[in-house]
């Protein structure tokens, strides 16, 4: 493979049609050769104005009284100039396109995906979520856009920002989970420290703590696990309002869910599997002294003590 200096020399000779057959064989091994050929073909299609070069030089000498030009002096053709200009445009356009190219990772229902960011940070994207970032311009734009939920295991020293529609999270060498779905904006920190920003609110969240942000208010809770349960196809909660828990249950199983005679102030700490509805219902209702019934496999009623059920 030719060196950069050799490439430059070969390119100059090619522009002036001075390559020997042997040099051309070397020149065609350059990775950019196909692009140069396309540019050359494009330039040849351009109709250039016809000029009498010798008459033009003589006229220029008379007007400016410059010395005679030797016959063997090289005159760079307009075609060569256009080739160079086209190559520069191609390179600049390619750089702009590559630096602004966004990689999008999407997951469907019941699907998760593992993504390695530049710098070797790992992201596990939960179902029905989208992650996007600019891999080729990561050094200048260390931003990840998230819709939905994802778990981040950040390589130490690899700082970047996670942007959601509801706020941003700034990270540096940590493990945390972000859930940004409709009205829910929940960040759980499992290791290290993250900063959460939403409007005028800015909070530093240490390991073992989670924050749920609403419009203008927030709630802090402790977490007692080292990773989010959904990584293992489970849903976990720490002192979470019962209606929020039932909302997750409804989404995970795609069921019709109704409640009767339930105290809406109940809070749930624990978890349930996402692949066994009967076990999930028992995990929620037993510790809270509730009951349930299942009709037609996709209609569930949860009721409290004293209900007519």
Image: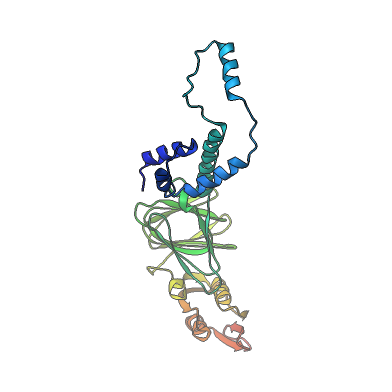
Q: Quadrant of the C terminus?
A: bottom right
Number of disc labels: 0
Q: How is the image coloured?
A: rainbow
Q: Foreground residue, 74 or 112?
A: 74
Q: Residue at x 44, y 71 (%)?
A: 231
Identify the residue shown where x is 55% and y is 86%: 291
Query: Percent x, y for residue 271?
Result: 46, 76
Q: Residue furthest top?
A: 65
Percent coordinates x, y for residue 117 in the rendering: 43, 57
Q: Is residue 60 above or below residue 245?
A: above
Judge left or right: residue 231 versus residue 132: left
Q: Nearer the viewer, residue 305 or 195?
A: 195
Residue situated in front as seen by the camera: 82 or 66: 66
Provide residue 23's location: percent of width, then percent of height. Answer: 40, 43
Using the image, determine if residue 289 lies above or below residue 83.
Answer: below
Q: Examine the rendering and report whether any part of residue 308 can be seen.
A: yes
One can see residue 203 in this view: no
Task: Give the image quarter of residue 184.
Answer: bottom right
Q: Report the front residue among 180 and 222.
A: 180
How far across and how far down the image is residue 1, in percent? 36, 48
């Amino acid at each position: 493979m030719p060196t950069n200096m050799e490439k430059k020399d070969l390119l100059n000779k090619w522009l002036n049609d001075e390559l020997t057959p042997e040099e051309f064989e070397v020149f065609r091994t350059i990775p950019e050769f196909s692009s140069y050929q396309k540019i050359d073909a494009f330039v040849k299609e351009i109709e250039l104005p016809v000029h009498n070069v010798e008459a033009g030089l003589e006229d220029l000498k008379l007007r400016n009284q410059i010395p005679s030009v030797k016959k063997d002096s090289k005159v760079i053709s307009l075609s060569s100039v256009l080739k160079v200009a086209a190559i520069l445009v191609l390179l600049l356009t390619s750089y702009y396109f590559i630096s602004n190219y966004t990689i999008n990772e999407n997951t469907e229902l019941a699907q998760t995906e593992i993504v390695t960011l530049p710098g070797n940070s790992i992201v596990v994207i939960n179902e029905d979520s989208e992650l996007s970032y600019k891999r080729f311009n990561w050094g200048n734009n260390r931003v990840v856009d998230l819709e939905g939920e994802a778990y981040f295991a950040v390589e130490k020293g690899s700082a970047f920002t996670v942007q959601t529609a509801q706020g941003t999270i700034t990270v540096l060498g940590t493990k945390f989970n972000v859930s940004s779905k409709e009205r829910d904006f929940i960040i759980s920190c499992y290791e290290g420290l993250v900063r959460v920003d939403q409007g005028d609110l800015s909070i530093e969240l240490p390991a073992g703590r989670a924050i749920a942000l609403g419009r203008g208010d927030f709630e802090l809770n402790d977490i007692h696990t080292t990773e989010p349960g959904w990584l293992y196809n489970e849903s976990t909660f720490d002192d979470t309002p019962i209606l929020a828990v039932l909302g997750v249950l409804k989404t995970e199983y795609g069921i019709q869910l109704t409640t009767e005679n339930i105290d809406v102030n109940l809070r749930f700490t624990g978890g349930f599997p996402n692949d066994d509805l009967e076990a999930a219902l028992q995990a929620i209702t037993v510790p809270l002294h509730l009951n349930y019934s299942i009709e037609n496999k996709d209609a569930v009623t949860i009721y409290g003590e004293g209900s007519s059920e």
